[in-house]
Image: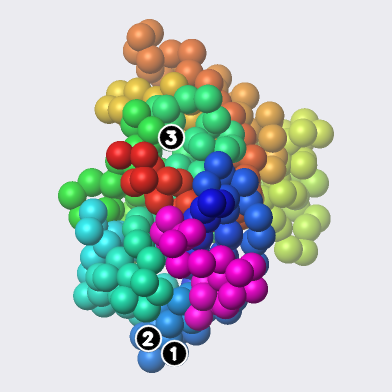
Amino acid sequence: MERFVFGIDIGGTAIKCGLFTEDGRLKEKWEIPTERAAEGERVPQDIADTILAKCREYGIRREQVLGVGLGVPGPVSGNGFVSHCPNLGWREKNVNEIMERLTGFVSVAANDANVAALGEMWMGGGAGVKNMVLVTLGTGVGGGIIAEGKIVAGATGAGGELGHMVMNPQESEPCGCGGFGHLEQYASATGIVRMAKKRMAETKKSSVLRGKETLSAKDIFDAAKEKDPLATELVDELGSVLARALSHVAAVVEPEVFVIGGGVSRAGSVLTETVKHHYNKGIMKALQGKEFRLATLGNDAGIYGCAKLILDRIEK
C-alpha cells in the first residue's frame, strides 16, 4: 500500500502545500492564499480543506496518510503550541491539536525557518550531512540549526534566530524587531542596500551604484563582480559580519556545513567565498575549514522539511 505525507509551509500571504510519497518524492505542490482576517482564524480550516480535497482527488484513503507536517512563521514548542505568531495573528494555539481534529491525521508543527533547514539537510544543499546550519538572507535574516539530523529549536521553539544576534551594540538605527545592531541590519538584502546608501552619503567614492534610481542587493553584487570599488567594499563588509556571526554559531554547535539561502544567495560564489575567507581568519583552528554551500530547494525547502518532520516521527 502506497503511503503519503503532506508538507504545509504557512506564509503570511500564501500557504505552500506539498504531497509527498513515503520515500520523499514530491508528487505535487500547490499554493492557497493565507486568509489573515480575524486573527487568521480561517487558516487551519483552509489547510484541512485543501488536504482533504487532495486526498479525494488522488483517491488516497485515510490509512494511507502518515501525517501532516506544518511550518509556522513563529516560535513553536515541542508539542505544537504557538504563543504568538504576528504574521498570522495567532495567539495561544496548539496547532497540532487543531489540525488533528480538523483532518483526522497526525500533525507535527515547527518553526518555518527550522523546517526549511531540515528540508535543505534532507534533499537540498545540506544533503549528505547530519550537522548543518542554514542561514537565509532575504528581506530579513533567518536561520535553522540541525544537529544529528534533528532541529535545534530551544525551550519554546525560538532557537535558530540567527538574524537577531547582536553584531554591533553601537548601532543607532533600530532593527525591524526593535533591537539595535542585529545581523539582519547588515547581512540581509535590505541591510546591504541600507549600508550602500549610507556609504554613498558619507563618501565621494565613485561607483556605478550612484546612477541607480532604485538600488537593490542584486545591483550591489553585480557591481562587485565587475570590481566596482564601492560595491566590492560593501560585499566584503557583509561577508565579514556574516562570517563573524557564523563563527559564533560554530563555536556552540560546530556544524559540518553552512548552507546559505534566500534571495541574496543568488549572488553565488562571490558571497560564499567572501564569507569563507573571513570565517577562516577569525576562528580557532579546530573550527576552520568548514564548507559553505548554497541552498538548492528555494521556496520548496519548507514543504520538504515539513514532510521530513512526519517521516522522522514514523522512523522513531
Crowding around mark 2 (Cα neighbors within 10 Å: few <14, some 14 to 19, many 20+) is: some
Q: Magenta region: which residues?
A: 49-68
**Label 1 close to label 2 by CB (< 8 Å):** yes
Amino acid tagged 1: Ala
Q: Position of residue 314 (x, y in %)?
A: 36, 45
On screen, 285 above or below 106? Answer: above
Crowding around mark 1 (Cα neighbors within 10 Å: few <14, some 14 to 19, many 20+) is: few
Q: Which residue is mark 1?
A: 37
SS at mark 1?
helix
Quadrant containing the C terminus in the rendered view:
top left
Q: Position of residue 127 (x, y in %)?
A: 55, 30
Q: Which residue is mark 2?
A: 41
Residue 133's label in the rendered image is 3
The Cα atoms of the two marked residues, 1 and 2, are separated by 7 Å
In the picture as drawn, the residue positioned furthest to the front comes out as: 1
Side (left or right) of 18 relative to 78? right
**Residue sitting at x 56%, y 44%:** 24
The Cα atoms of the two marked residues, 1 and 3, are separated by 34 Å
Q: Is residue 202 visible?
A: no
On screen, 246 above or below 69? Answer: above
Q: Position of residue 208 (x, y in %)?
A: 80, 46
- Mark 2 or 3 closer to N-term? 2
On screen, 155 above or below 103? Answer: above
Residue 66 is inside the magenta segment: yes
